[in-house]
Image (cartoon, rainbow, N blue to C red):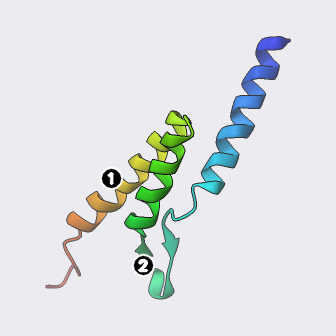
Amino acid sequence: MIRRASTLTLAVALSGAALLAGGAPATAAGGTVTCDVAAMSVRAAHLRAQGRYAEAQAVEQRIRACEDAENDNSGPLWH
């Protein structure tokens, strides 16, 4: 029972962290995705300062995903 309760608590905490990670990709007009890497970096640093390393690592992973998406963007298919 304790194991289930702790698993549930962890799942709720992580889902709340995903919502609070904010600055994560937000859909802009035209269906493109934009990332505020600077704000996300500040958030990750703040989380690390609080000792919330797993959440900070998740934000940093989103930053890398945003940077990878930007670098891999080959443009329109008809160029």
Disc ID at residue 64: 1
Determine whether, in the image, residue 54 is placed left or right of residue 37. right
Query: Quadrant location of residue 19?
Result: bottom right
* Quarter of the image with the N terminus in it: top right
> Residue at horizontal 13%, vertical 85%?
79
Marks 1/2: CA–CA distance:
17 Å
Determine whether, in the image, residue 10 is placed left or right of residue 43. right
Looking at the image, the residue that sits furthest to the left is: 79
> Residue at horizontal 70%, vertical 48%?
16
Q: Residues within 10 Å of mark 1 (few under 14, many from 20)?
A: few
Whether 60 is drawn above or below 69: the answer is above
Query: Quadrant location of residue 50?
Result: top right
Residue where numbered disc 2 is placed: 32
Disc ID at residue 28: none
Determine whether, in the image, residue 72 is placed left or right of residue 56. left
Mark 1 and mark 2 residues within 8 Å of each other at the beta carbon: no
| Amino acid under disc 1 | Arg
Q: Nearer the viewer, residue 4 or 13?
A: 13
Q: Nearer the viewer, residue 32 or 67?
A: 67
Determine whether, in the image, residue 1 is placed left or right of residue 38. right
Residue 2 image point, x, y percent: 82, 12
| First along the sequence among labels 1 and 2 | 2
Whether 41 is drawn above or below 15: the answer is below
> Residue at horizontal 35%, vertical 61%?
66
Q: Residues within 10 Å of mark 2 (few under 14, many from 20)?
A: few
Q: Secondary structure at mark 2?
A: loop
Residue 21 image point, x, y percent: 57, 55
For the image, the number of numbered tags is 2
Task: Please tell me whether mark 1 or mark 2 is closer to you in this view.
Answer: 1
Whether 16 is drawn above or below 13: the answer is below
